[in-house]
Image (cartoon, rainbow, N blue to C red):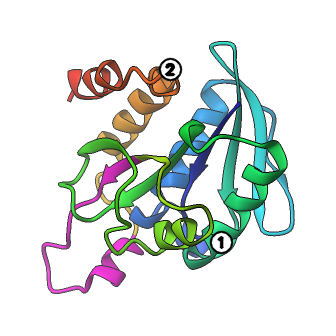
Amino acid sequence: MYLIVGLGNPGERYELTYHNIGFIIVDAICKYWCFQAFSKKNNYLITSGTINGSKVLLLKPYSFMNNSGISVVKILNFYKISLDNVIVIHDDADLQLERVKIKQGGSSAGHNGLKSIDSFIGNNYWRLRFGIGRPEDKRGLADYVLSKITDTDSITQLVERITKNIHLMLNKENTAFINQIIQCS
């Protein structure tokens, strides 16, 4: 069994913001792979389905970013999922806009959602880092990540490529996954 976690903040105010790219991608995976509708639990939204024959849970911690680890550890413990089968999808301001990288383990690089998860389960899980870049104007980083996405067409296309090819990442075919993502860039 696999767990794919999309990081974001709950509420309409945060929909379609750079910081919610994890929620956006997990929603797209849910729709594309015909998962059940998300059900709301105490502090998270969850659904299950299959991707190319593999059982997968999709999780959206429905607390603010700083508390994401609470729901992640709860699901990991309940379903006895190995950290090697966990993928956390999140925004990354240190990557150029629309650049995607994957890695296992490492530091949180200041991302509060990852810091929270690390504090509960350690850091040896997979990350899909979605580059959002840094503000080109004088806004601070916090204002930028909580602003609405401006170039929705190209981001939508990248989200679609990630969604269609996520099965490669589940199978640890990481080079093939990245090649499919950048092939059409």
- The quarter of the rendered structure image containing the N terminus is top right
Residue 148: image location, x then y, percent? 40, 67
Q: Is 140 rendered above or below residue 165?
A: below
Q: Earlier in the sequence, mark 1 or mark 2?
A: 1
Q: CA distance from mark 1 to mark 2?
A: 33 Å
**Nearer to me, 7 or 75:** 75
Q: Amino acid at mark 2?
A: Asn
- The quarter of the rendered structure image containing the C terminus is top left
Packing grade of label 1 (10 A; few <14, some 14-19, many >=20) is few
Q: Is 166 on the left or on the right of 9, as rendered?
A: left
Q: Which mark is residue 79?
A: none
Q: Quadrant of residue 141?
A: bottom left
Specify the segment rendered in magenta. 128-147
Residue 125: image location, x then y, percent? 50, 48
Q: Which residue is mark 1?
A: 11
Report the residue at 68% width, 50% height from top.
59
Q: Amino acid at mark 1?
A: Gly
Report the residue at 81% width, 43% height from top.
79
**Nearer to me, 136 or 91:** 91
Q: Quadrant of residue 62?
A: bottom right
Q: Secondary structure at mark 1?
A: loop
Q: Is 140 on the left or on the right of 60, as rendered?
A: left
Q: Is 12 rendered above or below residue 26?
A: below
Q: Which mark is residue 171?
A: 2
Residue 100: image location, x then y, percent? 29, 42
Badge 1 vs badge 2, beta-carbon distance below 8 Å:
no
Q: Secondary structure at mark 2?
A: loop
Report the residue at 36% width, 34% height from top.
157
Residue 104: image location, x then y, percent? 39, 45
